[in-house]
Image (spheres, rainbow, N blue to C red):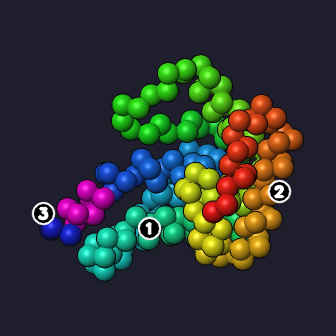
């Protein structure tokens, strides 16, 4: 097997679950998330010759995912429902209170479904991916002011539609 192909295969196998989690949070739908990751990985494969040496393959793939998602929004797709389940991270880390975690996950999923795709993307980038405002703006192709306003609007909307998520609102005080 070609060594470059083997490296790409290894990258896909190890990073796809994490990419799918991010894509699901961006799209709100398991099938759309899979399509988004597949499209981003196809573009990554085309650029693999220059990416495999730099070690920036995952960053390139994630940025491609965000750009693809923004371009899909611009096509004004019909809003999708969120029928899929959030992929679980691999590993042995499990929360001690599964009922609380499940309840929180379902509540968060329903609340995220009530946000616009842009608002959802900003929250995913800022709080799930732990990106700075500048990084989120760059990835989405918008200004830092847009990221700030969308973050504020998103959190305000979450407070309205899901007050039971108040324990998560400590994210708002972040100064990234």
Mark 1: which secondary structure?
Answer: helix
Picture coordinates of residue 65, whole percent (x, y) = 53, 64
Identify the residue at horizontal 80%, vertical 58% (top origin): 152
Q: Which mark is residue 130?
A: none
Picture coordinates of residue 91, whole percent (x, y) = 36, 35
Determine the CA span between mark 2 and mark 1: 27 Å
Identify the residue at horizontal 80%, vertical 36% (top origin): 162
Mark 2 touches mark 1? (CB < 8 Å): no
Mark 2: which secondary structure?
Answer: helix
Q: Earlier in the sequence, mark 2 or mark 3?
A: 3
Location of the N terminus by quadrant is bottom left
| Magenta stretch: includes residue 10 | yes
In this rendering, position of residue 163 left or right of residue 125:
right
In this rendering, position of residue 108 left or right of residue 99:
right
Density class for disc 3 (Cα within 10 Å; few <14, some 14-19, many ≥20) is few
Determine the CA span between mark 1 and mark 3: 26 Å
Determine the CA span between mark 2 and mark 3: 50 Å
Residue 147's place in the image compared with 89, above or below, is: below
Q: Which residue is mark 1?
A: 59
Q: Which mark is residue 1?
A: 3
Density class for disc 2 (Cα within 10 Å; few <14, some 14-19, many ≥20) is some
Picture coordinates of residue 16, whole percent (x, y) = 40, 52
Location of the C terminus by quadrant is bottom right
* Stretch of the chain drawn in magenta: 5-11
Q: Nearer the viewer, mark 2 or mark 3?
A: 2
Residue 159's place in the image compared with 64, above or below, is: above
Q: Residue furthest bottom?
A: 50
Mark 1 touches mark 3? (CB < 8 Å): no
Identify the residue at horizontal 54%, vertical 21% (top origin): 98
Mark 3: which secondary structure?
Answer: loop
Q: Earlier in the sequence, mark 2 or mark 1?
A: 1
Q: Which residue is mark 2?
A: 153
């Amino acid at each position: 097997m070609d060594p470059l192909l083997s490296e790409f295969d290894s990258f896909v196998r190890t990073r796809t679950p994490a990419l799918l989690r991010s894509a699901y949070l961006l799209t709100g739908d398991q099938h759309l998330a899979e399509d988004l990751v597949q499209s981003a990985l196809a573009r990554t494969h085309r650029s693999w010759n220059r990416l495999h040496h730099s070690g920036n393959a995952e960053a390139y793939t994630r940025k491609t995912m965000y750009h693809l998602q923004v371009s899909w929004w611009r096509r004004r797709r019909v809003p999708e429902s969120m029928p899929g389940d959030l992929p679980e991270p691999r590993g042995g880390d499990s929360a001690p209170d599964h009922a609380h975690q499940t309840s929180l996950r379902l509540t968060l999923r329903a609340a995220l479904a009530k946000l616009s795709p842009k608002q959802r993307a900003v929250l995913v980038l800022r709080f799930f991916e732990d990106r700075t405002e500048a990084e989120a703006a760059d990835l989405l192709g918008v200004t830092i002011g847009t990221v700030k306003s969308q973050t504020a609007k998103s959190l305000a909307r979450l407070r309205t539609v899901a007050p039971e998520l108040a324990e998560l609102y400590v994210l708002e005080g972040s100064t990234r």
